[in-house]
């Protein structure tokens, strides 16, 4: 019967732990439905019309990042320098220009540098929906077989790269050789 | 009076605007299904709004996607699966009953049962305690019974 006296304290401790764990979870972050799924099929024009149409086959063969960006996306500005840096260090980055204006997008790349091997021009956001995109910037890490292995919603900066991407990227690169 | 009528009309017009969606379907039966689906689907960008309530660009896109899928002849279940494969279960306002949501569904019932047990236990104990703590409660009960039987003497 004595033990019953400690019941409120025990409940309090349990509740505290649950709530404490809850502090760390970000409610705006959705679970990724597409991790370990193949990159969705698509056929869209490249941002640069001279490059013609692009489909999912052109993403396969090498470990790469697919970065969803747009000129209206403020956080993409912050991210851009990091992308340039990654591209310089040899990371293959494919752009997905999401619901944007072509002229603005060109200007953006001229002004800030172009870290992308090529950019897919998704004017209506159809590939965006197939990727479950709900806010730019988003970055997908795909392996050499074209499977999505990781997804980050939000800015990729030094910290995010080293904490979340670098290890998996190196591992996938090693596997691909 | 005139102002009041105007005010009432103005207040009503808001809800009329909100429900009139400029969505045209090839089959009129799609409209009702569309409406019920966008009420049950959650906007992925906003924390607590369905596709019907939200005006964010992604909600507009997803409403158009629901419309497109309806026109393709998909069933409600297929459309839900289609969106879930892209946006995870988050897109459903009503979580499905499965392994990861058992706790969510069962917890209220369990907590209610625990509450009932606690209240039941407490009330029984207090009844026992009051009899034990007041030995003359039996006398009082007897006196009360006598009083009720014989009236006020």
Image (spheres, coloured by chain):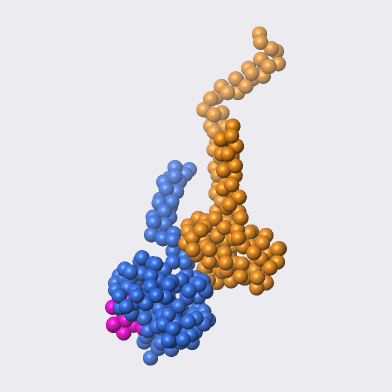
Based on the picture, tell me whether residue B153 belongs to the magenta stretch. no
x and y percent of residue B113 in the render? 58, 47
Q: Main secondary structure of the magenta part?
A: helix
- Depth check, front residue: B105 or A129: A129
Residue sitting at the far bottom: A177
Residue at the location (43% across, 72% down)? Answer: A101
- The part of the image, by quadrant, that contains residue A91 is bottom left
Residue A15 appearing in the image: yes
B112, above or below B58, in the image: above
Residue at the location (60% across, 67% down)? Answer: B66
Quarter placement of the C terminus of chain A: bottom left
| Number of marks drawn | 0
x and y percent of residue B84 in the render? 56, 68
- Depth check, front residue: B108 or A143: A143
x and y percent of residue A4 in the render? 47, 44
Q: Which residues are magenta?
A: A82-92
Residue at the location (54% across, 38% down)? Answer: B122
Answer with left or right where residue A21 lies relative to residue B128: left
Answer with left or right where residue A79 lies relative to residue A19: left
Based on the picture, tell me whether residue A88 belongs to the magenta stretch. yes
x and y percent of residue B36 in the render? 64, 59
- Depth check, front residue: B104 or B120: B104
Q: Colour of chain B?
A: orange
Residue at the location (67% across, 72% down)? Answer: B73
A5, above or below B143, in the image: below
Q: Which chain is blue?
A: A
B127, above or below A7, in the image: above
A116, above or below B137, in the image: below
């Amino acid at each position: 019967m004595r033990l019953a006296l400690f019941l409120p304290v025990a409940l309090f401790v349990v509740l505290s732990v649950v709530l404490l764990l809850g502090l760390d979870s970000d409610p705006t972050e959705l679970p990724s439905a597409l991790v370990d799924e193949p990159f969705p099929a698509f056929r869209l024009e490249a941002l640069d019309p001279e490059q013609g149409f692009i489909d999912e086959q052109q993403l396969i063969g090498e470990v790469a990042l697919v970065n969803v960006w747009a000129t209206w996306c403020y956080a993409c500005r912050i991210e851009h320098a990091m992308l340039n840096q990654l591209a310089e260090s040899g990371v293959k980055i494919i752009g997905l220009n999401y619901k944007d204006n072509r002229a603005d997008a060109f200007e953006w790349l001229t002004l800030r540098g172009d870290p992308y091997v090529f950019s897919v021009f998704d004017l209506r956001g159809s590939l965006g929906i197939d990727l479950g995109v709900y806010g730019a910037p988003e970055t997908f890490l795909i392996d050499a077989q074209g499977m999505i292995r990781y997804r980050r919603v939000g800015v990729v900066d030094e910290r995010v790269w080293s904490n979340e991407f670098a290890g998996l990227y190196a591992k996938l690169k090693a596997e691909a050789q | 009076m005139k102002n009041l009528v105007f005010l009432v009309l103005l207040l009503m017009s808001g809800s009329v605007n909100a429900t009139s969606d400029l969505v045209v379907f090839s089959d009129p039966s799609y409209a009702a299904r569309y409406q019920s689906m966008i009420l049950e689907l959650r906007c992925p960008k906003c924390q607590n709004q369905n596709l019907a309530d939200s005006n964010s660009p992604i909600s507009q896109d997803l409403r158009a996607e629901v419309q497109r899928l309806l026109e393709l002849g998909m069933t409600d279940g297929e459309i839900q699966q289609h969106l879930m494969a892209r946006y995870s279960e988050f897109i459903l306002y009503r979580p499905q009953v499965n392994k990861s949501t058992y706790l969510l569904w069962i917890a209220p019932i369990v907590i209610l049962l625990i509450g009932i047990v606690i209240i039941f236990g407490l009330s029984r104990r207090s009844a026992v305690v009051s009899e034990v703590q007041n030995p003359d409660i039996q006398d009082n009960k007897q006196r009360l019974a006598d009083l009720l039987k014989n009236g006020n003497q």
